[in-house]
Image (cartoon, helix red, strand yellow):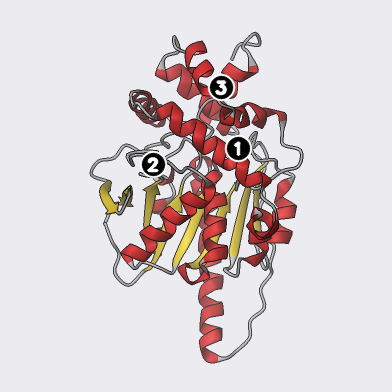
Amino acid sequence: MSSTDSPDTRTAALPVPPAGPGSRAGAAETVRSVTLPGLTLSVRTPAGGEAPGREPALCVHGLGGSSRNWSALMPLLADRVDGEALDLPGFGQSPPPGDGNYSVSAQARAVIRHLDAAGRGPVHLIGNSMGGAASTRVAALRPDLVRTLTLISPALPELRPQLTAVPTALLAVPGVTGLFSRLTRDWTPERRTREVLALCYGDPARVTPEGLGSAVEEYARRLQLPYFWEVMERSARGLVNAYTLGGQHSLWRQAERVLAPTLLVYGGRDRLVSYRMARRAAAAFRGSRLLTLPEAGHVAMMEYPEAVARAVRELLDTHAVLHEDAVSGGQHVTDVTADAGRS
């Protein structure tokens, strides 16, 4: 990355990679379309399809991402949960919503509507970045739909965001996405993808050639969509607006209302969500446990899927014990905060 590049053209790209390492859809995954009134969602399921008897799980991606962001993590949990990942409206293979609403609350409603229509709740809900903010709203508003909550670098309000996150926030300003599109019109999909990976990964060298090729292919496809830049602008604006809400609609206030056992995952090299927010989040979500990965960036489930999977499994084990104790009328006390080092 050249030192002469403008910060805006260098980092005002997709805040989350459009695809993950080794995430080409094929024999290993199935994708189906779910149609609801005014809303169509693309839903991805890992190899093996549905797993009868296993508790359901749902993964929600971040701004600019897709269900393919979970293709490295879901197989590692397939023996424990019946997992699926959705493309939020306007992202991945999901078309824009009928009402054109890209607010965090609208994304949360999309998740709720999908779960209600499918009858899959309560689920183990897993969200990254913007998807973490939407998942927080779901868990606060519909506790009946959430067994456990895992948030990976959740986009929760920061009073002093990192400078490296400012260009992404600028996507919310009217006209900026058009300017960025013009300034980067000569960029190849590969260059765009490498810029995103440099922003989101603690160490972009961890991306395999196959993973890079998959992400480049998906980015090129997205750029051909007539609504690509509009979705990015409106979604970024919806996220910024969510940061300014106060009272009962504040994301931090809603975090305090979450009853589900919660796992928080933060990366020490995250350039979009500050590592210093980990302790505040651990204090806000009651009874939460904290996994810190010093070498990870913004998408730990893509960089260190094994470490994240181990932590999720521990959360599932704790939930199972608490559930058994609740049924039997016993009591069980757990260590609420667990820090992890390098994976």
Q: Is residue 238 above or below residue 147?
A: above
Residue sitting farthest toward the bottom: 329
Q: Amino acid at mark 1?
A: Gly
Q: Residue at horizontal 37%, vertical 37%?
A: 22
Question: Circle 1 — which element?
Answer: loop
Is residue 302 visible in the rendered image? The answer is yes
Front position among marks 1 and 3? 3
Q: Amino acid at mark 3?
A: Val
The residue labelled by disc 2 is: 68
- Which label was assigned to residue 176? 3
- Report the residue marked by disc 1: 297
Q: Considering the numbered disc 2 on the image, is that residue within a helix, a strand or a loop?
A: helix
Is residue 171 toward the left or the right of residue 294 in the image? left
Question: N-terminal of the two: label 2 or label 3?
Answer: 2
Residue 324: percent from the left, percent from the top?
Answer: 51, 83
Label 1, label 2: how far apart the Cα atoms are? 18 Å
Question: In the rendering, at what x and y percent does residue 205 appear?
Answer: 53, 27
Real-space Cα separation, disc 2 to disc 3, in angstroms: 27 Å
- Of the residues tagged 1 and 2, which is closer to the observer? 2
